[in-house]
Structure formats: C-alpha cells, structure tokens
Image: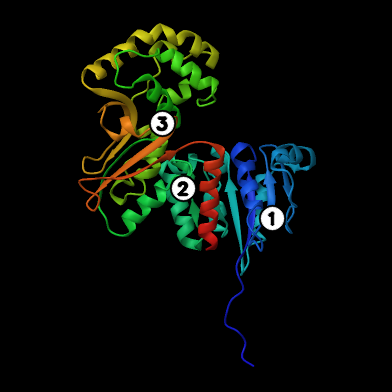
C-alpha cells in the first residue's frame, strides 16, 4: 500500500520573553487557541528569570505569570536561551521567539537567532528603528536561513499597517506618501486640546489627565519629544526600497519637532515636568488660536513623502473637515497611504493604536502567519 505524501502539520515551540501587560495578554490569547493547537510554550522569561520546559509549560493564570517566573525560574541567561532553543529546531518543528520587551540588548540578538533558524516576532521597535547596520544584519540572516521576522505590532499595535504597506510594495504599487497620527498619546492630547475652537482646556491640564489615565509614559516628555513617532516612521520607510538607506542612524535621523519646552528638557522627573508645564500654556494656547482662526486643528503627525525623500514628525495644521480632525477619538491612530492605485483618495487605516489587548493581537496574528 502506497504511503501518504501528506506531511504532518508543523509544530511550533514558542519562547516568550517579556510577560508584562502585553506579554501576559499574548500568552492568554495563545493558551485560548482552540485544540488541537500547533503551538506550545516552551519558555517564559522576565528581565531577571526564566522557565524552560521543552515539552511545554502547563497553562496557568496569565495574571500570575510574572510572579511565577520570578518565584520558580532560573536566572535570566541569554546564551542559555539561544543554545536550548536552537536545539529544538528540526524538520517538522519550528521555534519562535516572541520578544515583548523594549530592550536594545534583546533586539541585538535577532540576527543570531535568525541565523540559527529561529523565527522572531515582536512589538519591540528597537531593532527595526535603530542603526541601519542592525536592520541589514536582520535581513541578511533571515535570507540565509529562511527564518522569518515579523513585527506588525511595532506600528499601530493590532492595526494592519505594516502588512498593508508590504502588500502595496510587493504587488508593484508605487507609494508616494504616508501620513498619519501614529502616537496614541499624541492623538489623545490633541483630540482634547484642539477641536477647532479658539478656547478649550489648557495644554498642561490635558497632559496631566493623559498621564493620570496611563496614556503617557511616567514622564510625558518621553512622548512629547516625538521619538515614538520617529521610530515608527523609520520602520515604515525601510519597507520602501527607495528609502531603505535614507536613515543610517535610524529614528535619530528623522526630522522631529519636539513639543518639550526648552526649559523642561532636563526636568528631573515626570512629576516635575507636569508641575512646571503650566508655565508654557500661553505658547500652546497661541498655537491653538492661530489654527482655529484658520479653520484648522493641530495634530502631531508623521509624514513620509517618498517623492521628496522627506521623513518628518511634528505638529501640523489640518482643516476641521479633514479625517485627522473628524475621524479620531480617544487615543486612536489613523494612517493614510497615498499611492498610484490609491489616488486621489488615499487608503485609510484607523482604530485603536495602543493597549495590551490589541498589541497582543498583532503579535498573535504574526504567529498565525507562520502557521497558516
């Protein structure tokens, strides 16, 4: 009797580094995947400890993951992780590292892992928005072994931003411009501060509330300096062949207009920053009034103008009828793709661009791309 030529389904050993808000939510989504599942979690790690069980770590409460890893785990050891996971790579079985950290050190290991045939999925922006040398090392390692790196959730959390741009480029469309509100923090602040009226809440009060709601970093200056938007622009620009070499130093090469007042650039803490920000309310009020008199609102946007070789992030005015004025709510993101096919009306993606659940969904969707 002839043997079947149908290959058994691939199995995936999943190593999760970072089990905080996003990491624990991702694990919860993965453990909720319907049986029979091709995925088994073989490693859970925090910045200090790790648990490794090659046959699979039993399900537990995702809210207790960090505590359990800290209580039961071995000391964190990157060479150990690399060695043990590489030993699991074999025909019919893939190994995937899911990096839920924001660590530069972990990001620097991606080329090593890819060279060993280990797939990498991450919401960590560092590797893809840092030096061009690291990015090219990642591309080279992936091409040599076929191991894939997927990073949908580095831009827009669960929104299909990166996959859409990849599809436009791969199918031969000519992208001419990308513009958007890429920061959930900046979106919330300016949705509240600038509505088209000359009057409204003070800038400092809006920032204070945003911080209290958890929309900002502990020090809001880390959001207002525009770095997060610059990183996302770097990630997207490198997916456009003509711009890949444009930012050799990564996000620091982006023309970024910080909103941090010069006098607060060296504020000792987030508390000090928020306490002293009212001193600059008059300057921000003037910006709002000037925009309103022009029939516009203020939005902090990122722009990639392919034809002009221009990549920038900063505060811009948009008419009160523009989608950036009418379609945003809360901390939503909105991104417009202008291309030869999508012209004169651009392709628009919008929705929640931050939060553990949607970010973890973006990570989970990348994992499913490897399996199906």
Q: Quadrant of the N terminus?
A: bottom right
The residue labelled by disc 1 is 84
* Residue neighbourhood size for the residue with mark 3, other residues' Cα within 10 Å, grouped as few (<14), some (14–19), many (≥20): some
Looking at the image, tell me whether mark 3 or mark 1 is earlier in sequence order. Answer: 1
Q: Classify 177 as above or below 83.
A: above
Looking at the image, tell me whether mark 1 or mark 2 is earlier in sequence order. Answer: 1
Nearest the camera: 255 or 286? 286
Q: Classify 207 as above or below 340.
A: above
Residue located at (74% from left, 52% from top): 57
Q: CA distance from mark 1 to mark 2?
A: 27 Å
Q: What's the colour scheme?
A: rainbow
Rendered location of residue 364, percent (x, y): 55, 51
Rendered location of residue 345, percent (x, y): 23, 45
Q: CA distance from mark 3 to mark 1?
A: 46 Å
- Tell me if I can see residue 104 in this picture: yes
- Residue 126 has which mark? none
Is the C-beta separation of discs 3 and 2 under 8 Å? no
Rendered location of residue 95, percent (x, y): 61, 58
Q: CA distance from mark 3 to mark 2?
A: 22 Å
* Residue neighbourhood size for the residue with mark 2, other residues' Cα within 10 Å, grouped as few (<14), some (14–19), many (≥20): many
Residue located at (56% from left, 41% from top): 357
What number of labels is visible? Answer: 3
70 relative position to 281: left or right: right
Of circles 3 and 2, the one toward us is: 3
Of circles 1 and 2, the one toward us is: 2
The residue labelled by disc 2 is 152
The residue labelled by disc 3 is 329
Residue located at (57% from left, 58% from top): 116
- Tell me if I can see residue 256 in this picture: no
Rendered location of residue 148, percent (x, y): 50, 57
Looking at the image, tell me whether mark 3 or mark 2 is earlier in sequence order. Answer: 2
């Amino acid at each position: 009797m002839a043997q079947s030529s149908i290959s058994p389904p691939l199995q995936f050993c999943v190593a999760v580094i970072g089990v905080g808000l996003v990491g624990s939510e991702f694990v919860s989504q993965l453990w909720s995947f319907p049986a029979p599942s091709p995925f088994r979690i073989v490693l859970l790690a925090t910045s200090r400890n790790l648990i490794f069980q090659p046959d699979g770590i039993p399900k537990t409460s995702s809210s207790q993951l960090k505590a359990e890893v800290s209580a039961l785990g071995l000391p964190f050891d990157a060479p150990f992780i690399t060695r043990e996971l590489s030993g699991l790579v074999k025909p019919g079985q893939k190994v995937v590292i899911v990096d839920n950290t924001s660590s530069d050190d972990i990001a620097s290991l991606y080329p090593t892992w890819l060279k060993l045939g280990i797939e990498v999925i991450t919401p960590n922006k560092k590797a893809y928005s840092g030096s061009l040398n690291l990015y090219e090392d990642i591309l080279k390692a992936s091409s040599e072994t076929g191991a894939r790196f997927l990073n949908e959730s580095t831009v827009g959390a669960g929104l299909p931003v990166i996959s859409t741009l990849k599809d436009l480029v791969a199918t031969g469309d000519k992208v001419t411009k990308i513009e958007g509100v890429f920061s959930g923090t900046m979106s919330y602040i300016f949705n509240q501060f600038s509505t088209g009226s000359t009057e409204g809440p003070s800038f400092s009060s809006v920032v204070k509330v945003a911080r209290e709601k958890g929309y900002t970093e502990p020090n809001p200056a880390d959001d207002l300096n525009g770095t997060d938007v610059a990183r996302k622009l770097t990630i997207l620009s490198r997916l456009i062949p003509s711009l890949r070499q444009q930012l050799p130093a990564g996000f620091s090469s982006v023309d970024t207009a910080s909103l941090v007042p010069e006098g607060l650039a060296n504020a000792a803490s987030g508390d000090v920053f928020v306490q002293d920000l009212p001193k600059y309310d008059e300057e921000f009020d003037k910006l709002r009034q000037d925009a309103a008199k022009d029939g516009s609102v203020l939005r902090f946007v990122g722009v990639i103008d392919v034809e002009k070789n221009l990549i920038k992030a900063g505060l811009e005015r948009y008419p009160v009828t523009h989608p950036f004025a009418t379609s945003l709510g809360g901390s939503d993101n909105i991104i417009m793709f202008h291309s030869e096919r999508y012209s004169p009306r651009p392709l628009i993606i919008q929705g929640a661009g931050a939060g553990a659940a949607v970010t973890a969904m973006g990570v989970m969707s990348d994992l499913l791309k490897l399996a199906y």
